Structure formats: structure tokens, C-alpha cells
Image (spheres, helix red, strand yellow):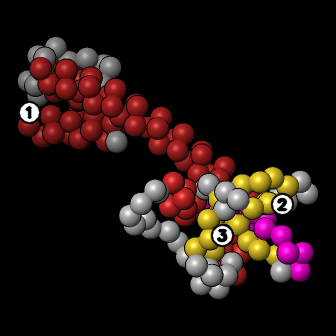
Amino acid sequence: DAEVFSLAGGSEQRTVTRVGVFNLISDDQYLTYNDTTEQIQPLGRQPDGYVTSQADTFTSTDSGYAGVYLDPSKGQILGLLTQKATLMERYHQGGTVGYVITVVLIIGLIISLFKLVTLTVVGGKMRSQLKNIENPSDKNPLGRVLKVYHENKNADAENLELKLDEAIMRET
């Protein structure tokens, strides 16, 4: 047990595990020893979750072997890891340009979602029209083209081709 001083100024007795001359670990936190004040303190910001969860597993192991991330520089590398910007900090570093890009992304996602829904609905109507070719419907593109065919099936081949081409052009 050792006295661990919080960054806010208070202190508490905690079980501290010393990993050689490299690290101090308590529960799921990496600690650092401040030479000038001769105090044990938690890092200003703990490393990523997978590193701290490994530390928690290491301290709760009773016997055998357990993995742990070591800092052979006695806390210097862990200190650098805590200075690394998080994903949200990086997002906000983008400033106005990043926010504009985010708005454009959201608008694009909304448009693509809308198109996906409308194309799915139209595709369903066209599939049902394929099952009923003799009764064309005005509610789907295939039905409108079939309706032109049914209205002009007695016309000569050239006129029928022109009418069908015109109907297809209207649908595209």
C-alpha cells in the first residue's frame, strides 16, 4: 500500500504494484512517481482502454503469468501517449472546415438514404409489374413503357420502335 496523490490535490491509500523499475500500477491506472515532490500520482490522462484493461488484469492475477504494457523509460512514453489527441480532439482541431465537411457528409447520407428507399420501392413495384405484364400500371417505369407497347402494338415495327424509344427516354 502507498499514498497516492490525486491530481486535484487529495490523497488516498491504494494498493500499488511496482513492475520492476519501469512502472507503477494501481487497479486499472498507470501511476507515475514525481521525483521533485516525491509523490505517486496517476497520469494526467490514462492511455487507451486496451492498455489500462491489461494493467487491471495484471494487478488482479494471483499467480502465474499475466501480460502488461511496460514503459522502460519510467513513465516518459506513457506521458507522451497521454498527450496524443483523442478522436474527438482531432475532430475539433479541424475547425470550421471540418464542420463544413461533416455537414456535407450528413447531407450526402440523407440523400443516399432517400434514394435507397425510393429505388427499393420502385424496384418492388417493377417486380410486381413483371408478374402482371398484361395489365400495365402508371405507377412504375416498366408499367408506363408496357402501356405504350399495349397502346401501339398494332402499329408497324418502325413506329412502335419510335414510341417505345420515346417512352424509355422519358423514364431515364
Return the x and y of residue 164 as percentages of the image width and height. 21, 36
Determine whether label 3 and label 2 are within 8 Å by CB: no
Left or right position of 9 against 108: right
Q: Earlier in the sequence, mark 1 or mark 2?
A: 2
Return the x and y of residue 103 as percentages of the image width and height. 66, 49
Q: Is residue 38 magenta?
A: yes
Q: Which residue is mark 3?
A: 24
Q: Amino acid at mark 3?
A: Leu
| Residue 116 found in image quarter | top left
Distance from the alpha carbon under mark 3 to that under mark 1: 91 Å
Determine whether 39 is above or below 118 in the image: below
Determine the residue positioned at 59% across, 51% down: 105
Left or right position of 119 against 71: left
Q: Which residue is mark 2?
A: 5
Q: Secondary structure at mark 3?
A: strand
Left or right position of 12 against 168: right
| Residue 141 found in image quarter | top left
Q: Secondary structure at mark 1?
A: loop
Which residue is at the far bottom?
73
| Residue situated in front as seen by the camera: 91 or 30 | 30
Q: Amino acid at mark 2?
A: Phe
In the rendered image, which quarter contains the C terminus?
Answer: top left
Determine the residue positioned at 79% across, 60% down: 4
Q: Is residue 89 magenta?
A: no
Query: Would you say residue 131 is visible in this rendering?
Result: yes
Q: Are there few (<14), some (14-19), or many (20+) residues within 10 Å of tag 1?
A: few
Distance from the alpha carbon under mark 1 to that under mark 2: 95 Å
Distance from the alpha carbon under mark 3 to that under mark 2: 13 Å
Q: Amino acid at mark 1?
A: Asp
In the image, the segment drawn in magenta is: 36-50
Numbered tag placed on residue 156 in the rendering: 1
